[in-house]
Image (cartoon, rainbow, N blue to C red):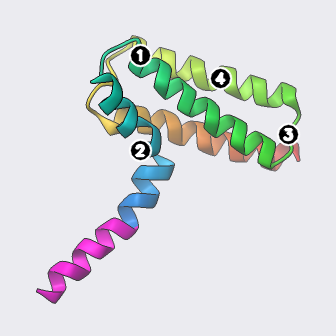
């Protein structure tokens, strides 16, 4: 009984940061529910989530607006290319990879540009 509770707590402690923040679950799960995974609305909402990530990190690290716009463009292109090669519906990992690459790219940009 105690092992089950510990295991469940450990899963939540690991899953929330990894799936919610790194993999963009905070954007993809609500977007999937609101749009019922229908495109183009799902792709648009996921793109808005990417825009929030790029904007928040860019402004938090005081990056030049040109760099933020360039990163935003790259994130949207990556999302649209991924969407071209397959649907994003009902699969957190499909958007999660795009969000993780965008997140890491923004932190690298902030590190090297600052």
- Residue at x 89%, y 34% (from the top left corner): 64
Secondary structure of the residue carrying tag 1 is: helix
- Which residue is the site of mark 4? 74
Instruction: Using residue 83 as the reference point, say whether residue 36 is left or right of it.
Output: left
- Sequence-wise, the earlier of marks 4 and 3 is 3
- Sequence-wise, the earlier of marks 2 and 1 is 2
Residue numbers of the magenta segment: 1-13
Q: Residues within 10 Å of mark 3 (few under 14, many from 20)?
A: some
Q: Which mark identifies residue 63?
A: 3
- Sequence-wise, the earlier of marks 2 and 3 is 2
Question: Do tag 1 and tag 4 residues touch (Cβ < 8 Å)?
Answer: no
Q: Nearer the viewer, mark 2 or mark 1?
A: 1
Residue 50 vs residue 85, the one in the foreground = 50
Question: Do tag 2 and tag 1 residues touch (Cβ < 8 Å)?
Answer: no
- Which residue is the site of mark 2? 25
- The alpha-carbon separation of the residues under discs 4 and 3 comes to 16 Å
Q: Residues within 10 Å of mark 2 (few under 14, many from 20)?
A: many
């Amino acid at each position: 009984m105690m092992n089950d509770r510990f295991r469940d707590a450990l899963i939540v402690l690991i899953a929330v940061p990894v799936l919610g923040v790194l993999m963009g679950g905070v954007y993809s799960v609500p977007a999937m529910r609101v749009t019922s995974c229908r495109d183009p609305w799902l792709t648009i909402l996921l793109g808005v989530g990417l825009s929030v990530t790029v904007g928040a990190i860019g402004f938090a690290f005081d990056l030049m607006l040109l760099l933020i716009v360039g990163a935003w463009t790259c994130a949207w292109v990556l999302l649209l290319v991924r969407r071209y090669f397959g649907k994003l519906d009902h699969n957190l990992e499909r958007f999660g990879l795009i969000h993780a690459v965008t997140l890491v790219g923004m932190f690298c940009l902030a590190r090297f540009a600052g």
